[in-house]
Amino acid sequence: MWDFLLNLSFWDWLALGTVLLILEVFGAGGYLLWMGIAAAAVGVIKFLVPPLVLEWQLLLFAMLSILTAVYWWKRQRSSAKASDQPGLNERGSELIGRTFMVHQAIVDGRGKIKVGDGVWMVTGADAPAGAQVRVVGQDGVILKIETV
């Protein structure tokens, strides 16, 4: 085994890179992508500089893996920008301030209101079915209401 490691060829690095990239396809979440690219880069360097010793190959692999991952992480963070529609995935936030009728009586602080053709869970003061309530907030998929 030690003899194999001491005599790694560029084909071995390219094969390792290929295996890591294939494993990435199965859902590693981006972690193996950069290691696969680094292994392929070490394979290319080993092809260009054949007498490169194992220690330098491993050091190059480690450094390139870290550098490529950090580069991508910083690039992703810098390209993240604020949305021009901040409430896009918060459907309930557009209901805040609007008045609705209680669909299912609010008992012990929990009930339902009818919004359009849908029904929303609500929390707030007890109210009978048919009462008017105003949406004052949202907690996940549950709307917070107050009686009108």
Image (cartoon, rainbow, N blue to C red):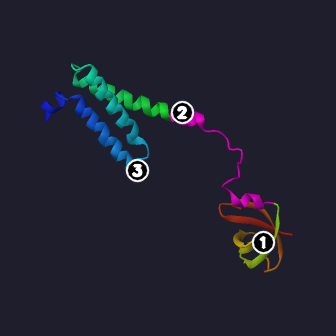
Q: Could you tell me which secondary element the residue under label 1 belongs to?
A: loop
Q: Quadrant of the C terminus?
A: bottom right
- What type is the residue that disc 3 sits on? Gly
- In the image, residue 119 lies at what x, y percent? 70, 73
- Left or right: where 53 falls relative to 135: left
**Can residue 56 be spotted in the picture?**
no
- Left or right: where 141 falls relative to 147: left
**Can residue 11 be spotted in the picture?**
yes
Q: How many marks?
A: 3
Q: Earlier in the sequence, mark 3 or mark 1?
A: 3
The residue labelled by disc 3 is 27
- Left or right: where 2 falls relative to 13: left
- In the image, residue 74 lies at what x, y percent? 53, 32
- What type is the residue that disc 2 sits on? Arg
Q: Quadrant of the N terminus?
A: top left
Magenta-drawn stretch contains 86? yes
Mark nearest the camera among 3 and 1 is 3
- In the image, residue 17 lies at what x, y percent? 31, 37
Q: Would you identify the image quadrant in which residue 92 lies?
A: bottom right
Residue bounds of the magenta highlight: 73-96
Number of other residues with Cα within 10 Å of mark 2, as a class: few under 14, some 14 to 19, many 20 or more: few
Q: Could you tell me which secondary element the residue under label 2 belongs to?
A: helix
Magenta-drawn stretch contains 61? no
The image shows residue 97, relative to residue 132, as above or below, that is above
The residue labelled by disc 2 is 75
- What type is the residue that disc 1 sits on? Ala
Q: Nearer the viewer, residue 15 or 94?
A: 15
Q: CA distance from mark 2 to mark 3?
A: 21 Å
The image shows residue 66, relative to residue 128, as above or below, that is above
The residue labelled by disc 1 is 125
- Left or right: where 31 falls relative to 57: right
